[in-house]
Image: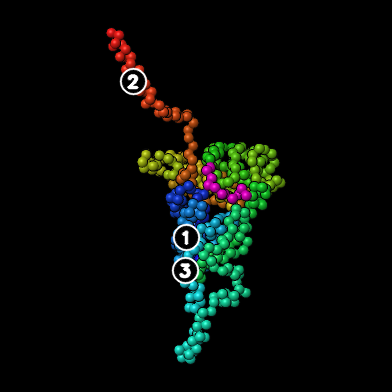
Amino acid sequence: MSIYGRKAEISFIITRSDLLAPKKEQVDGLMPYILQVLRDALGGSAENVRLGNVRCVSSKRGWWTKEVKEDIWNRGGGGWMVGKVNVGKSNLFENVFPKGRNNDFNFGSLRHAAQQKLPSDIPHVNGDKQQSIRSTQDPPEQLESQLLEDCLLPPAPPETSYPVLPLVSSLPGTTASPIRVPFGGGRGELIDLPGLARGDLEQFVTNVHKVDLVMRDRVKPEQLVIKPGQSLLVGGLLRITPTTPGLVFLAYPFLPLRCHVTSTERAIAIHTQHKDSGVPTIAKPDIGSRMQSAGTFSLKWDVTKQRAGPLTKAAAAGLSTKILPFTVFSLDILVEGCGWVELVAQVRKRDMETGMEPSDLFDTGPYPRIEVSSPDGGHVGVRQPMGIWSLCGEKPTSSSKGPVRPRRSMKGVKKNLKKARRAVSSSYNYERDTM
């Protein structure tokens, strides 16, 4: 958020976008989806809002950090960085702060001089030029010191070309108070605020595994198959159970937590801590009684075109999704402060109500449904599927083809051919001499 003059401008910065996809072009292709999700999160008030200041940046890869730095420099004024704990604010601060760009102009003094009111007696009338010069050259630090009593921010440090920037650490709470760093000789300042709480899910996690809740590297999930009568356990904290009978679900966990598929009866016993097993869990002991249902959710977004493979691709069959005998639905289950689980299920159209399109069944249709259980029935949410697996996921290979035969080594082939020619030539000459 940048404040200059009396105008405040808000920019939405999605940090650590390299966790979504390995290439910048792939992340840029997700911008329409991100804008739509952002509008849904803002509610009806954002229906007519122009979301032009949305950036997917990566401090690790250097994606769009140069453009953000130029925007901060061109705007000037105060830039406030607001976000949750461990989302990369301090790291972004270090990459977008305009270091070493101070020039000879003191913008602070110029701004202060422009805001000073001229005295009633003009200098050329009463001849008091020295007093006028002193009134227009008062240092801005004097005005700042007068405002510190009512200011909620600490005093700004002396400006340098290469200041000491906020500490970058994976531990939460590193930024304990606002940090002000001026730049451009009074042109503006960048303010790093303490991170907002990510939620209280970590209170159910053992102290050793609390650091595992933060996703540090891009997750390459494996495809998990949830058959009828089975459930998915996520780190021992969440249990995802399909409620639609006779339907197979596919799960793609984009989480730093370990997931396990087992029978529903055994999953309930493990989740409520009524049974000991070898399934890895990060949950604290004696919290099984607090595991409650967070609700039942429907996979209501149609992703048939993205999931049908060559059937709908223009370069292959190029079929329309309307003539296919099935429909693929999907949903993202959000885990507070950790990541999400992408769920996919395929439904036959003849099993759905006849004479109605899938878009007409959002509230009443027989969509695939799942139930999610979590501590105190919270810490989860749902959203439109992002489709990261279709974008850059590792596709499973068929084991029926067997191993591929390695390519024949060409080392020494020419030498062996020469030996064979010499042997043939020598045998021919020997037969000719003996005749």
Residue type at mark 2? Arg
Instruction: Identify residue type, mark 1.
Output: Val
Q: From the viewer's perspective, is the residue at label 3 or at label 1 nearer?
A: 3
In space, the residues marked 3 and 1 are separated at their CA atoms by 20 Å
Q: Which residues are magenta?
A: 211-221
Q: Amino acid at mark 3?
A: Asn
User: Which one is closest to the eye, mark 2 or mark 3?
Assistant: 2
Distance from disc 2 to disc 3, alpha carbons, whole Å, reads 79 Å
Q: Which residue is mark 3?
A: 103
Tag 2 secondary structure: helix
Instruction: Judge depth for marks 2 and 1 and give the one in front.
Output: 2
Residue at image mark 1? 68
User: Is residue 219 covered in magenta?
Assistant: yes
Q: Against 136, is 98 above or below?
A: above
Instruction: Please state the horizontal and vertical placement of residue 9, each as a whole percent of the image.
Output: 49, 66
Residue at 48% across, 39% down: 395
Mark nearer the N terminus (2 vs 3): 3
